[in-house]
Image (cartoon, coloured by chain):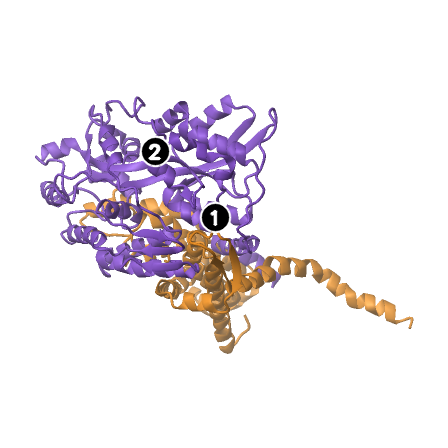
Chain colours: A purple, B orange
Amino acid sequence: MSRTTRLRRSRGTLAVTLATASLLISACGGSTGSKDPAVQAPVKPGQKVDLRFWSWVPGVDKAVDKWNATHPDIQVKLEKIPAGSSGGYAKMRAALKSGNAPDLAQVEYQEIPSFLLENGLVNLSRYGADKDRSKFVDWQWQQGVFDKSVYAIPQASGPMGLFYRSDLFKKWGIEPPATWDEFAQAAQKIHDADPKAYISTFPAGNSAWFTALAWQAGAKWFGVNGDTWSVNIDSPQTLKVAAFWDDLRSKKVIKTEPDFANGWYKDLQTGGITSWVSAQWGDAIISGNAPQTTGKWAVAPMPQWTKGSNVSANWGGSSTAVLKGAGHIPEALKFAEWLNTDPASVDLLLQGGYGWPAAADGYKGSSLDKPSPFFGGQKYNEVFAQADKSIDTSWKWIPTIDATYQHLNDGFQAALAGKGTFISAVQQAQKQTVEDLKRKGLKVSTGK
Amino acid sequence: MATRAPRRRRNLAPFAFVAPFLLLFLLAFALPIGYAVYQSVMDVEYTGALGLGGSHTVFVALRNYSDALSDHAFLRSVGRVLLFAAVQVPVMVALSAGLALLLDSASARGVRFFRAAFFLPYGVPGVIASILWGFLYVPGVSPLVDGMRHLGVSVDLLGGDTVLWSIANIVTWEFAGYNILVLVAQLRTVPAELYEAARIDGASAWATVRYVKLPLLRPALILTTVFTIIGTLQLFAEPLVLKPVSSSIDSAYTPNLSAYNEAFTNDNYHLAAAEAVLLALTAFVLSFGFLRLINKRGGDA
């Protein structure tokens, strides 16, 4: 018996270890009241403080180095983690459960409600964070405000536009599509011109992107009224977007490979993918992964549903949050404020490609406000500056958004495998999302 | 009485010897299982839209189990690993046994080299192996896929019908060497007299394999089969790593992936516990079912 146990242990899979670990971890769960712990006092001057910070943002290491050089008493140790939805949040949740979470972490806007529900964030209003409000773009500031209290310091958003290969578009005589109709026509033209080339991929496994497209089409998936959530994913606006991509898919004029994956990077390099509807932070993704295409890209506004209008959406966007259990909250807050407002820090983050600054005056005169050789000398960020002003900022997130993304991913992927359509995936995700919220014991109404 | 004291000491001795094992067994095995079962019958309820009113853990009896069993994605994932096991277990055992017998055959050359070569992949962590194989599966990156395309054969190794077998390939590559080693070790224990006797009786090499080696391999074959059954049901790392490059692997592709996602993505620790317990029960039933089947057919495992 003991021999087989040992053998089995040696072949013991990660999974069982994880499952057991997860179960052990949740031991520390139990019941949490709404009573807040006592407010921590700042440390005395001259006392040394060490903070742990988890992030995956490119370039954040340089900003942290700068902070450490100028603040010898408050040293921040940056630990790079996988990007949020690729395992970073799983890591944070496990750490929160086991009570050894870092002091600060990168938390995207859509995740803030989920972390709140799990009682994972510190109420920063009790530490005077409200005084920073005027330093940030208001709608981004509001992303971290719940029940009149601040739970996260905004960092950056992702106003959207269209990155496209200007050289290839010119070669084939195609204008950057101003409307989605034109986008569909361009998709056909591009694929006719070169059977190996496609206008873009539909990333079935990345529903955050699809969500942003629905956002642009005027959908309002979520709302909250008192303590009742409303879920309205299968609205006409969303179904319109789903039908649009269903159509392109059935005509086989788009790719359906995953984005941010090796095959897709290769396509960016070789012209297999000739455009990308993406957020401003997509610039660093393209220039970093396809450096040999320098000078061949340009940026246009996002294609519109109504000709002549100018509506954008937001994809991604992050905050710096202080996690439950942090030992030095006043100092952690100080760092979060500095990281996202100090001009030197914002500039370093911009150079890394962290997105669109949440700091109120982050764009003007920054490194964004210059012509870019990679984008053929275009001052391409003007497009995003405009986009940033035309986003429906009343969009809300629910605390079970990850599950919603997964339902959409699963449904889209099933559609690619020939089971159902993108439309049925959206309808299914609506039903499942209502169930998810109910599972948590929350009140839900559908927006009908 | 004078005789009683020494006898009690004698009665306690075995317990003293077993104690370290028992303690570890309780701490590392029985306790987590018990705790998982306890977790699976509880659930968290929140007050207020964002739980700002606090939360408390309540007893919900078998609700998590009924939720798991009525979740089509989870049931599909169980079906998927069962299908996977039905193919993977025979392939793995036959392949390992075949290669082990080749290594052990009298005419084998370069035995040490091949034994090391077979075993080497087992030394590569599953995650790394999956990343490496992932590169060989992705079109545009993989020399295999692109080479075949040049020959006019278009294969999608990450598609809905193929990705499960692409995973099977990784698992076979990873663990066959380990199983071969177990089988070779067993073959080494066969007394040389038996081979001599077989030779004197005029047995051919095939007959020796069939009537001497295979029957003596039986215990090791049973062991590797049980390990493979348990291992395939727990399929996790390979699909998790391939997920970003394949559109066909969803969040509940295997039961373990489903439990992992419920726990660490959806914060449903209690549902995850129920799924983990269900998976453990399935592995238990299949492993013991297999052992009973073997024992019924004679011989002792």
Q: Is residue B25 left or right of residue A199?
A: right
Q: Give neighbour class at mark 1: few <14, some 14-19, many 20+ (Cα, 10 Å).
A: many
From the viewer's side, name the closer residue of B36 and A211.
Answer: A211
Give residue B132's position: percent from left, percent from top.
Answer: 37, 44
The chain carrying label 1 is A
Quadrant where the N terminus of chain A is found in the figure: bottom right
From the viewer's side, name the closer residue of A317 and A173.
Answer: A317
From the viewer's side, name the closer residue of A343 and A26.
Answer: A343
Secondary structure category for the residue under label 2 = loop
Q: Nearer the viewer, mark 1 or mark 2?
A: 2
Which residue in the rendered view is the most extreme toward the left? A173
Q: CA distance from mark 1 to mark 2?
A: 28 Å
Amino acid under disc 1: Arg
Give residue A58's position: percent from left, percent from top.
Answer: 38, 32
**Tags 1 and 2 both on a single chain:** yes
Q: Are marks 1 and 2 in contact (CB under 8 Å)?
A: no
The chain carrying label 2 is A
Amino acid under disc 2: Val
How many numbered discs? 2
Give residue A62's position: percent from left, percent from top.
Answer: 43, 26
**Image disc number at residue A93:** 1
Instruction: Tell me which numbered mark, 1 or 2, is placed earlier along the sequence.
Output: 1
* Residue B114 shows up from this direction: no
Rendered residue at 36%/30% (across/down): A359
**Image disc number at residue B212:** none
Quadrant where the C terminus of chain A is found in the figure: bottom left
* Residue B278 shows up from this direction: yes
* Placement of A41 over or under A208, stated as above or below: above
Q: Is residue A151 left or right of residue B299?
A: left
Secondary structure category for the residue under label 1 = helix
Read off the residue under disc 2.
A137
Give residue A239's position: percent from left, percent from top.
Answer: 21, 54
